Image (cartoon, rainbow, N blue to C red):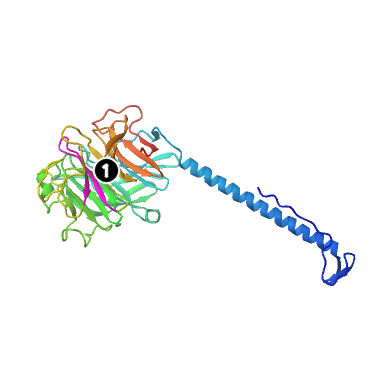
Amino acid sequence: MKLILLCLLSGIMVSGCADTDETTESNGQEITSSEQGNDDGQQEREEGQEQQRNEEEEHQEEQAEQEEQEEQEEIIEEPEVVAENLEIPWTIEKEEETFFLTERTGTIIRIENGEATRQEVELEQDLSLVPEAGLLGFVLDPDFSENNLAYAYYTYEDSNGPLNRVITLELNEEVWTEKSVLLDEIPSGRVHHGGRLKIGPDGLLYATTGDASVPELAQDLDSLAGKILRMNLDGSIPEDNPYQDSYVYSYGHRNPQGLTWASDGTMYASEHGSDANDEINQIEAGENYGWPIIEGNEEEEGMRTPLFTSGDEETWAPSGMDYYDGKLYVAGLRGSAVYAFDLETEEQREVISGFGRIRDVEIADELLFFISNNTDGRGDPEGNDDQLYRLSIPD
C-alpha cells in the first residue's frame, strides 16, 4: 500500500499579496493566504485519500482474479461425480457452464448450477431401442443462446425395419421438439448405427454412420451406411464435398463413433473393429478406410490404414473422443478406459480406468469430463450408475 505524505505549506504566496498576512479579494470575499493554503492542503488530502481508495479497490480486484484463476486451475487428481443415475447416456455437450447429455432412451439431461433436469424429447417417429440404437448424437447450434436449436441423430422403426435420421431440435420450456429433418433413411440394423454428430471448424455438420451389419455397404458410394457424412446446417450438400451431389465425406468405415479436430484443423475419427482391430484414423476428404476389405494393420492399394490400432489381440471399442495439446483422448467401452494417443510420439496408454464402460469424453476449462455406460445392457451397473465425472486432464 502506498503511503502519501502531504506537506502543508502555510506561507503560499498568493498573486498580488505582499506577505502572508495580507489579503486579496476573490469573488467579493477576503481570503487570507493561510486560508488558501488550508484549502489547497485539504484538496491534496482528499485527492490522496481517493487515490488510496482506488489502489485498494484495484488490489482487491487483482486478488479476486487471482483466487478465481487458482480455483479454475485446481488439480483434481481423482474423478469427481458431476451427475448420477443416468439412463444409458451417449453424448456430452457443454455450453458455457451448462451440460446437455443425451440418453438413448429418448431424453436429454440438462445440468446447470449443480441441478440436473431430465428434459422430454418429442420426436416425429417412434424411437427404436434395439441394441445400440436410440437417441444418440447431439450438438448445439452455434447460435443456441439465441435460437434454442440443436442437431440430433436417432434411430426409429418403420415398416421395413430400423432407420436413422439427422434432425433439428428446438428447446421450449424444458421440452425439445423435432423441428425439421435434415437427412433421413440412413441404413440401420440391430447394431452398427454410428451416430456421432459434430460441427467442424468449417461450421459444417458431420455425422458418422455404421455399416448397418451389412459390411459391403461401407464400400458403396450410393449408400449412406459405413460413412462419415458432411452437410450444411440446413441439411443441404456442400459444394466442396468430395463427391458431387453426395453427403459422403469418407467411406469404408465399419462403425465409427467418435469425431474430433486438432488445433490445426486435422480431423480424426474412432472406429470399432470386427472383434479386435479397433482404429483411430486421420480423416481426409474422399478417402477409403478399407472396411470390409482391410482392417487394423492390413494394407491395400488406394485404402488408408489407421494411425493407431488395437491389433488383433486387444479390444478398445472406442467411442467419443476429444483433442487437447497434441493428444487424442478416446472413450473405451469394452476396454473400460479412457485412452490417450500422442500424435507426436505415437505413444498410447490408458489414463483412466476402473469406472466400467465409458461412452464419451469432453474437454473444457482444463478439465476432462466422461460418462460411464454400464446400464447399456453390456456392462455391470453398480450403485448410482451411470454417471458423469470430471478430473484434471491427465498428462
Identify the residue at image location x=42%, y=35%.
76
Identify the residue at image location x=17%, y=32%.
313
Residue 113 position within the rendered picture, expressed as x and y whole percent measured from the top left: 45, 42
Question: Does residue 236 appear left or right of residue 215 in this picture?
Answer: right
Residue 358 position within the rendered picture, expressed as x and y whole percent measured from the top left: 29, 35
301 and 362: which one is in front? 301
Is residue 24 positioned above or below 95 on the image?
Answer: below
Q: Does 352 appear in magenta?
A: no
Is residue 261 positioned above or below 359 on the image?
Answer: below
Residue 167 position within the rendered picture, expressed as x and y whole percent measured from the top left: 26, 51
Residue occupied by mark 1: 135
- How many marks overall? 1
Identify the residue at image location x=83%, y=66%.
13
Residue 338 position within the rendered picture, expressed as x and y whole percent measured from the top left: 30, 36
Q: Which amino acid is tagged 1?
A: Leu
Helix, strand or loop at label 1? It is strand
387 and 183: which one is in front? 387
Question: Does residue 132 appear left or right of residue 77 in this picture?
Answer: left
**Quarter of the rendering containing residue 312:** top left
> Residue extending furthest right?
21
Quick one: label 1, few (<14), some, or many (20+) residues within 10 Å?
many
Q: Which quadrant: the C terminus?
A: top left
**Quarter of the rendering containing residue 213:** top left
Question: Does residue 119 appear left or right of residue 196 in this picture?
Answer: right
Is residue 302 positioned above or below 31 on the image?
Answer: above
Q: Is residue 391 visible?
A: yes
Question: Does residue 3 appear left or right of residue 272 in this picture?
Answer: right
Q: Is residue 89 visible?
A: no
Identify the residue at image location x=19%, y=43%.
255
Residue segment shown in magenta: 265-283
